Image (tube, rainbow, N blue to C red):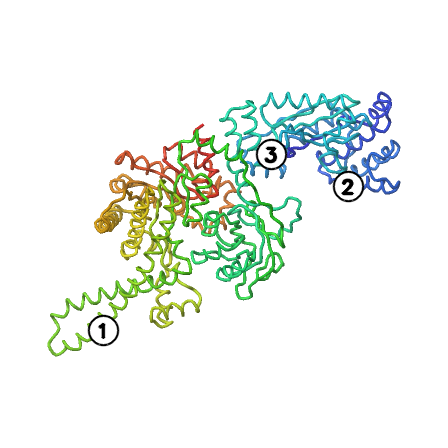
Amino acid sequence: MPGMMDTVLNLGLTPESAEGLAKITKNERFPWDAYRRFISMFGNVVMGMKHHDFEEILEKWKKKYQLTNDTELSAAQLKNICKDFIAIYKKRTKTTFPLDPQEQLRKSIIAVFESWNNPRAIKYRKIYDIKGLLGTAVNIQAMVFGNRGDDSATGVCFTRNPSTGENKFYGEFLMNAQGEDVVAGIRTPQPIQALQKKMPEAYKKLVTIRNNLEKHYRDLQDMEFTIQDKKLFMLQTRNGKRTAQAAVKIAVDMVKAKLIDKKTALNRIDPNQLDQLLHPTFDPKAKKNVIARGLPASPGAAFGKVIFHADETEKLAARKENIILVRIETSAEDVGGMHAAQGILTTRGGMTSHAAVVARGMGTCCVAGCGSIQIDYKKEEFTVDGKTVKKGDYISLDGSLGEVILGKIPTVEQTLSGDFNTLLKWADEYRKLRVRTNADTAEDAKRARSFGADGIGLCRTEHMFFHESRIDYVRQMILVASDVTSLTAIVDEMETALEKIPGKKIRSFQEKMKKAIKNLNEAQNLYTTALKKLLPMQRGDFEKIFTIMKGLPVTIRLLDPPLHEFLPKEDSLQRKIAKKIGASLHAVKEKISSLQEINPMLGLRGCRLGIIYPDIYKMQVQAIIEAAIHMKKKGIKVLPEIMLPLIGTVGEMELLKKEVEKTANSIFAKKGTKINYKIGTMIEIPRAALIADQIASHAEFFSFGTNDLTQMAFGYSRDDVGAFVPQFMQLGILEKDPFQVLDQSGIGLLVQMGIEKGRQVRADLKVGICGEHGGEPSSIEFCHRNNMDYVSCSPFRVPIARLAAAQAAI
């Protein structure tokens, strides 16, 4: 934990030993400089005093004698400073500064042990997921003094450049100083190469040691050194922290230099670190005014004007304006604006909320669940900590850190190196898991292929419906679908009742029946027209995706979300659709209201929709099969996999499979040709995992939808977890957010059970995962261990999954 634990330098000095040291070294200034450093460090680290208690005294003396640097202070001045330091020490701690070196040592040992639990060390362990360690050791080393005069120095160096990975000696040093001066930035250090002129012998030796240490540890070394009277002392070496860019370059270069093998190189890279290479970042030199923090839902950096509505975002983005879409939460109808925005900010929702999942798929920066922000849609502004940000004001988002920043922060685009591709090719040599992508558009599919995706594991057809050229037809289809169902039932009942109607009433009954049939025909026409309009659009979508994924499997999920998600909330849009279907605004409002559900995630969605409104699924299957046949005629190999969502009973699976096959066979007969396709399901309801053997008798593949599986098994709404899951993790109730990292001991058991039961019935059952966990390294390791065939993740996480899959195999 570099820089996290406490250190006490110059320990053992007293006024008496300082005088002795002055005589031995014939340098009266240096021991008093070391002693004032010791009093300051001991006061701060051991006794908890503030740095500024000592800094104020030091600055007062420098000002008195009009000095700029600490090195200009004379021995006499330093003696007086030490007296003032001891006086402030006594005033603040109510104790006398210890003059017994053994007492100094005992107290310092205790302080270093206790620094294991200082706030920065705790935070560091949390960030880097360091667990299970009880504490630290305390090292006691003899001092060497870099502040002994102009023949002494101190520095920090790396065997290679930790920012770029370039194989060039990198570091800084200061003459007549101690290590803390280099780190604290009190004086401007010199580049390590300048040491060659000042102390050629020490520099030559340092370069030799640099080469030896890197060869020995076979990794980038972060070293600290001190030169005392021209003699070089090495204080420590450790594996150096590095950027993602440097990590990749160093690993590849070391394989080329035969220092390490490919397996070691692959294991050296933290898969999550690759995110840095795939998204823009903020200029590290820029100043930031962070006004709020939320969840780092989708990595990257963006700035833009604050806009509160998705449709307005689309219009402004079309004029090449940078927009940050700010919403309380997003829904499926916001997808157009989300796609057009540079970044997305929501005040509700977790890491697998709609905003987070869609943003990651698009590669758009997103900060979610920022609860400290209060949005007022009417005034078109938001407030946070007394600050008001209005529509059109600029903000910046850091999706990697979850920061909301006032104003524009310039971004830096990342470029992928040849080393990056080399590393991923090595990963492909070792991994057993295939890595597919979650892609809903040709653009997503193209991006994922460029990142090395082995196919599509989840194509969400509902996202295709939100394009402005088709959303009105979708709304028309939804609003008249229930009319067709209810009117069909009414006409059927009337036909049955007709025989029993007395002669006198038969004429008026026939009139009513005639009117009902007319209404039914009108509703059927509107319904059929909408489906006919949507069919070629869906077919075109699939043809584009099949063309990009030629020869690779494409899993297409039939319509899943509740129907009300497609319906407009604004009056103007409701009026537009009312006119289109020849209904009153009041009737449309009533219909929209009737489709609202108390708990839509558990309501009329997924396969239930396909059963109640079979024509919708029939149209989608027709679009898939016809697109595949068209591709076949063009000589493009297609491997479509039709996925039935939210299956919880064998009856649902059996019924819908028959309908899919019936539609496909009808098209084959009409076209005079066939294509191979698979029918499977998403295992996302706990009951489906429990009866997986029964479902597998009808399903050719399982795709575990771990977002919903986690939601239903935990009983946590994934859109509301931001309100309590972070606190649960702080309290130790949860180790990780289960929507980010697969809960292997609970949800994992359901997945294991589903795989085992399914393969007992169907040995060749293809199994994958398509929840957000498909791109998370520890979850990928679980998938490898449980013999899944593939993982599927958002396009930007494909490289991460490729590397994580290789590490799991290694």
Mark 3 packing: few (<14 Cα in 10 Å), some, or many (20+)?
some
Amino acid marked by disc 3: Arg
Up-down relation of residue 348 to residue 777 (above or below): below
For the residue carrying disc 1, how many other residues have a C-alpha within 10 Å: few (<14), some (14-19), or many (20+)? few
The answer, for residue 652, to whether it is visible in the render is yes
Q: Quadrant of the N terminus?
A: top right
Give the distance between the C-alpha atoms of the residues marked 1 and 3, in whole angstroms: 76 Å
Mark 2, residues whose alpha carbon is within 10 Å: few (<14), some, or many (≥20)?
some
Where does the image place residue 8, in percent across and percent down from the top left? 72, 30
Mark 1–mark 2 Cα distance, whole angstroms, equals 91 Å
Residue with the mark numbered 3:
242
Q: What element carries label 3?
A: loop
Amino acid bearing label 1: Lys
| Sequence order check, earlier mark of 1 and 3 | 3
Q: Which badge, 2 or 3, is on the more N-terminal residue?
A: 2
Instruction: Relative to 144, say whether 295 is above or below.
Output: below
